[in-house]
Image: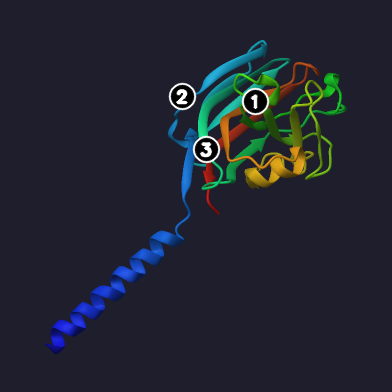
């Protein structure tokens, strides 16, 4: 009876520890598996010409390299992400350099070596569509924000700035739900699409950058 009691107690402890471990594990929603060389469910959208996107191996891992030479095209994926469960957007990126001398708040300077969009669709009410562009800014201060030069329905956020960290992989994390509340005053429950774009159509410059995996997480 004593042995049975001890074994039963041990079983309860093991089950309890497993439950705590499962509950404490961060939930994730994968959006882009570039390290596996996958563009599954991603589509291209061209604005001016075609930015070249190709997989390359860097530091022993695959990433998606973008090369723009006076071009502006991006890749997007329609995907619904529940921000109540996974509000944090995680990604990594790398730039070869930034664009010099452009004013990013004007249409003539709306070029970035890397940017990641998160989009909330307005559906039939297209004017309700909202987007945040997380960018590696050429010159704006880190964590500054401004309205996109082409539409008031998109906000720009400078997550990185300048060429100081060019040639280095940098990992990022943003609370998308809080950013939408801060920038638009909306408390949203989900996003409907994610996009990436490297563009230089306004400046005519040449840019090269790389994107790592993109995913949402609960913490």
Kindly identify the residue that appears in the image at 30 percent across and 75 percent down: 13
Please rate how many residues cluster around mark 1, counting C-alpha atoms within 10 Å: few if below 14, some from 14 to 19, many from 20.
Answer: many
Q: Secondary structure at mark 3?
A: strand
Q: Secondary structure at mark 1?
A: strand
Give the x, y percent position of residue 121: 61, 26
The residue nearer to you, when weighing 13 against 138, is: 13
Distance Cα–Cα, label 2 vs label 3: 15 Å
Q: Is residue 210 above or below residue 6?
A: above
Give the x, y percent position of residue 213: 52, 38
- Quick one: label 2 or label 3, which is nearer the N terminus? 2
How many discs appear?
3
Give the x, y percent position of residue 157: 75, 38
Distance Cα–Cα, label 2 vs label 1: 16 Å
Q: Which residue is mark 2?
A: 41
Q: Is residue 61 above or below residue 44?
A: below
- Quick one: label 3 or label 1, which is nearer the N terminus? 3
Residue 92 shows in this picture? yes
Q: Which residue is mark 3?
A: 81
Residue 56 shows in this picture? no
- Quick one: label 2 or label 1, which is nearer the N terminus? 2
Q: Name the quarter where the C terminus is drawn.
A: bottom right
């Amino acid at each position: 009876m004593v042995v049975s009691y001890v074994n039963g107690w041990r079983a309860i402890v093991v089950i309890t520890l497993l439950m705590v471990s499962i509950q404490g594990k961060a939930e994730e929603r994968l959006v882009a598996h570039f390290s596996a060389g996958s563009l599954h469910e991603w589509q291209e959208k061209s604005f001016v010409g075609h930015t070249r996107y190709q997989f390359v191996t860097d530091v022993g891992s695959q990433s998606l390299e973008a090369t723009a030479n006076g071009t502006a095209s991006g890749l997007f994926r329609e995907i619904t992400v529940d921000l109540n469960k996974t509000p944090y957007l995680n990604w990594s990126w790398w730039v070869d350099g930034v664009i010099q001398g452009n004013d990013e708040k004007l249409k003539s300077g709306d070029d970035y070596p890397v940017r990641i969009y998160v989009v909330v669709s307005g559906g039939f009410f297209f004017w309700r569509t909202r987007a945040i562009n997380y960018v590696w800014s050429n010159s704006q201060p880190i964590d500054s924000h401004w309205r996109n030069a082409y539409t008031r329905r998109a906000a720009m956020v400078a997550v990185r700035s300048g060429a100081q960290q060019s040639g280095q992989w940098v990992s990022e994390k943003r609370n998308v739900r809080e950013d939408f509340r801060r920038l638009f005053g909306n408390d949203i429950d989900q996003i409907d699409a994610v996009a990436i774009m490297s563009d230089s159509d306004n400046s005519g410059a040449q840019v090269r950058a790389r994107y790592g995996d993109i995913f949402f997480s609960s913490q």
